[in-house]
Image (cartoon, rainbow, N blue to C red):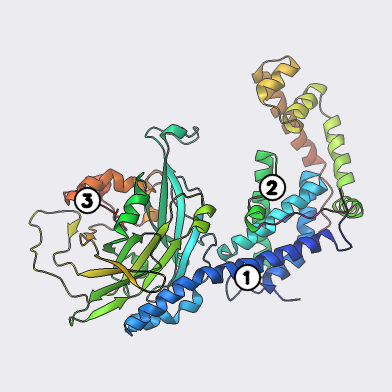
Amino acid sequence: MKPTDERETLDVLGERLTEAEQGMRARRRGLIVPTLAGVALLVGLSFTPPGRVFAGEIGDLVGIGDEPSVEQRFENEADAVVVDAGKAPGGSDYEIVALTSFQVSIGEMPGNPVIESERTDELCFSLDIPSRGDTNGICFTSENFQEEIEERVVRGRLNPAPAVLRPETELIVSGHASAEVADVSVTYIDEDGNEEVAPVGFGRLTTELADEIGSERIGGAFYAFLPTGLKKLDDEPPSAAPRRFSTLPKPPRVTITALGDSGEVIARSQADRSVLSPVRPVSFQDLGEDERSLGHFLRKCEEEIALEAPLRPECEIRPVFGKPGVE
Amino acid sequence: MPRLSTAEGPFHGERFAALYQEQSHDLLVFFARRVYEPELALDLTAETFPQALISRRKFRGTNDADAARWLYGIARHQLHHYFRNGEAEGKALRKLGLEVPDMSDAELARLVEESGLDELRAAMNGALSALSNEQRQALQLRVVHELPYPEVASRLGISEASARARVSRGLRALASHFESNPLPEEAT
């Protein structure tokens, strides 16, 4: 054991901790810069009330790179990191969390060793509301996920907002973006026919953050908060067949715009409009331990969701965020 | 010294420094009395604070006492990890790129004294000496040398079931001994 200098060991450790803590804050400031630039651009596009409210909260964007405030509820969570944080309309703090998880073969029982050859790695994103302990996640398991996400650039899907965000937010547009996307803008048409900009939370899973959670995949995830009173798009008649999950008869048109580092438009797409309307909303937290992988649930029920067919009883819960590629 | 009042939310900056100043020494003693090794106690202390720093946003308390309870909860997790895996976790230290400083011989000696380790070791030796030779040997192989039960059984020339039984009975006897002969109280 080598003696240190004249300072006590605990003082030395404390000093190193202080330096590390200051370094953590500096890194977070650096990570926030692209997001702030994106929000500023978004506000520049439209001085809508929700836009101003959201922009006013950018000072609260802290915690990027931290562990999430809410314990994640995925079956096999590995590591998780906050990629964005802020306030949703209504004032609730939110965190966008990226985490790695994995699925194992059917028949794998708790307590048994994981069979590596039958393990499928997942990249998951979750919109967490820490004050309510609420998590709303979706996992991507496709081996070609990185290629798909790069090819599509940006893609989103309309879903009912979690109960904790109501009544200020009626619908959520959740989606993912390629690594080149620095920010995402989401617009909708209000009841008067005016195009409005929705508040958006956008987080980038950079290479640095991906390393922290052991993910080989990088990219962005976003959540747009849409209020009530959106203009309905068309006159599609509602389905005559009774469904546990029915499409809303007149879904709104929502446009997603992917922006580059300089605010340039990289791509645009329309949000998938097959909004799933729950008959019996069930909180994710109410599910049993073995049901708490939303990715698992979506795979189990994706055929019914994709075909908008009547759901089996075991699918009679609300998939908060849809799976990309399910039309 | 800045106070730990956390009514505004998770602590950071000066408030975290205050938590460190107020708790680091006591925590070092806490670990030392549980692992009996001052250097290992320093490793565990050094891992606990970075872990607290990284996860400080999970803190939901409102005052100094809450902060201390929260910190000791993390400390116990570190302790359990050590008992399960035989080494300090080190994950948070690596994440922050921190190295654990070395303690001087004088500091080591002072920590042994402050933690009452000599007393504890004497008490443990007394408890072990009260066990039968068979139980003591089984405990030494299993707990001290951390050998798997088949190896313990092989070295003792008995079946694995018998080895498990001897270790189990030895641990129960130790627990019973310390119930009637409590270890010296922590000074803190």
Chain ID, mark 2? B
The residue identified by callout 1 is B11
Left or right: B64, with A325 as reference point: right
Quadrant housing residue B70: bottom right
**Residue in view at x 26 percent, y 46 percent:** A301
Q: Which residues are magenta?
A: B97-104
| Three-letter residue code for mark 3 | Ile
Q: 10 Å neighbourhood of mark 1: few (<14), some, or many (≥20)? A: many
Q: 10 Å neighbourhood of mark 3: few (<14), some, or many (≥20)? A: many
In reply to whether residue B98 is colored magenta, the answer given is yes
Q: Position of residue B56 (x, y in %)?
A: 60, 64
| Sequence order check, earlier mark of 1 and 2 | 1
The residue identified by callout 2 is B79
**Residue in view at x 50 percent, y 48 percent:** A78
| Three-letter residue code for mark 1 | Phe
Same chain assignment for discs 1 and 3:
no
Q: Position of residue B130 (x, y in %)?
A: 84, 30
Same chain assignment for discs 1 and 2:
yes
Quadrant housing residue A247: bottom left
Left or right: A273, with A267 as reference point: left
Q: CA distance from mark 3 to mark 2?
A: 47 Å
- In what element is the residue under mark 2? helix
Q: CA distance from mark 1 to mark 2?
A: 24 Å
The residue identified by callout 3 is A305
Chain ID, mark 3? A
In reply to whether residue A97 is colored magenta, the answer given is no
| Three-letter residue code for mark 2 | Leu
Q: Quadrant of the C terminus of chain A?
A: bottom left
